[in-house]
Amino acid sequence: MTLYLKDAKFIDWQNFKISSTDLAVEAGPTGSISLSSRIPGVDALASGDSVIDCQGKYVTKAFGCGHHHIYSTLARGMPAPRSIPTNFPEILEYVWWHIDKRLDLEMIEASALASAIYCAKSGVTFCIDHHASPFAIDGSLEIIAKAFDRVGISHMLCYEMSDRDGEKIREQGLAETDAFLASGRPGHVGLHASFTVGEKLLSDSIALAKKHETGLHIHVAEDKSDQAHSEATYGKRVVERLHDTGALELSKSILGHCIHLSDNERKLLKNSKVTIVQNVESNQNNNVGLGSYGELADQMMLGVDGMHCDMLRSAKAAFLSGQATEGIGFDTIYNRFRNVHRYIESTGTAGDGDNNLVILDYDAPTELTQDNFLGHFVYGIDARHVETVIAKGKLLVENRKITTVDEKEVLQHAREMGRKLWSKL
């Protein structure tokens, strides 16, 4: 099956070369694209083939999210916590841990379906998620995977394990992770953060990651309290602890945030092959500070940390905050935005190939060229310009409408699940 894109302005996502061309997009997880000047006539199309007239609109590679928390989807507009948090540990205790303990499998599915729709309509066709539901663990990852599959979003998932809810729930998390990865689904061994992860859980998680040839996905030094706990409990800082236990040797590992780092921790990370994911809007929302990454830039990608599903918005926020913290440039933030593709490719995970595309109805007031593309990326192109989205060669969004599920029905059910969740808070 081939999808033809007629009269497109194709932007090569790696060198920004703009070609006025037709495109042939093959379907499938490993389908390719080819630039062509000829599209078969209607009578010559094979069964299942179709044509979209781009009418001179821009086409480029779709986007990816390096770190999400889809379980937060039903939190939007929720009642205020009974106690107002005054620091980051209290934000976790009074808000996020209060929510995740009350999730059930039906709520999780609703969250995943709604979040997948928001991803698709924002041009995001691959999502790396970090899930938590300590009293609804068994089967939770497969439910999320099937919901993402139903919408058409490729994924790498993990369950966020910790010791904060006791030994039984810790062991359930390990069992869920083992079963999910053993099924052949792509994913990670998820951990919350060093200050909720004891020695046994960390050791068991590293062993599990080695068993399934994957990496950890863990929050690191998001707040100073994480470092203070590690130094008081283990006599070393968080990254040093991960290094000493062998976690940094797992090249597929993702370390979220990494805001409060020492020079030695930076050196250890630089000498490793792990990937760091920046979530600047979440950091600002939680008032935990902003990272300055410098020499670690090549190991970085961008996430949203449950705030929303819009990676273009995330990139702009990271660029603007990075002006003061690290003098960031257009090229640096674009590379962080696109490094998720390089990460996915390095893991051998399918679903993020060249046949994942967005058609942008970008009404630029000035000329867009290969030389000035990055200026348009930072100051111009945003999610409202995403008109059509193609994933694995198939249409997910056409003329801003999701094609794979009934959006109205999904969101109506999500609202019902939101009310159910809020009644438990």
Image (tube, helix red, strand yellow):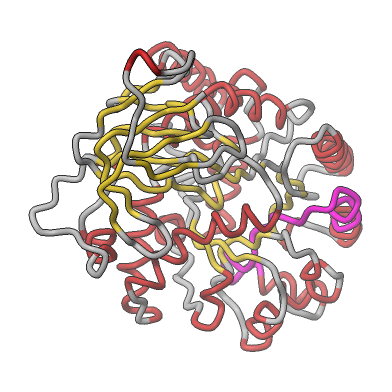
**Measuring 37% from the left and 39% from the top, which residue is drawn there?**
23
Q: Is residue 13 above or below residue 384?
A: below
Q: Is residue 60 magenta?
A: no
Q: Nearer the viewer, residue 393 or 40?
A: 40
Give how far across and how far down residue 264 sits, in percent.
Answer: 68, 87
Taking the view exactly as shown, the residue that stands out farthest to the bottom is 263
Residue 266 visible (yes or no): yes
Q: Is residue 257 left or right of residue 42?
A: right
Q: Residue 147 versus residue 153: which sits nearer the camera?
A: 153
The residue positioned farthest toward the left in the image shown: 365
Q: Which of these two is toward me, 248 or 284?
A: 248
Above or below, comparing residue 281 to residue 26 in the picture: below
Query: Looking at the image, which residue is at 55% across and 45% down?
Result: 353
Q: Position of residue 57 (x, y in %)?
A: 22, 41
Write down the quadrant of residue 53 in the picture. Answer: top left
Which residue is at a point 25% across and 34% down the rendered structure image?
Answer: 54
Q: Kindly tell me whether residue 74 is visible in this rendering.
A: no
User: Quarter of the image holding residue 204?
Assistant: bottom right
Q: Is residue 222 magenta?
A: yes
Find the magenta span and give its range: 206-226
- The C terminus sits in image quarter: top right
Q: Is residue 248 left or right of residue 408?
A: right
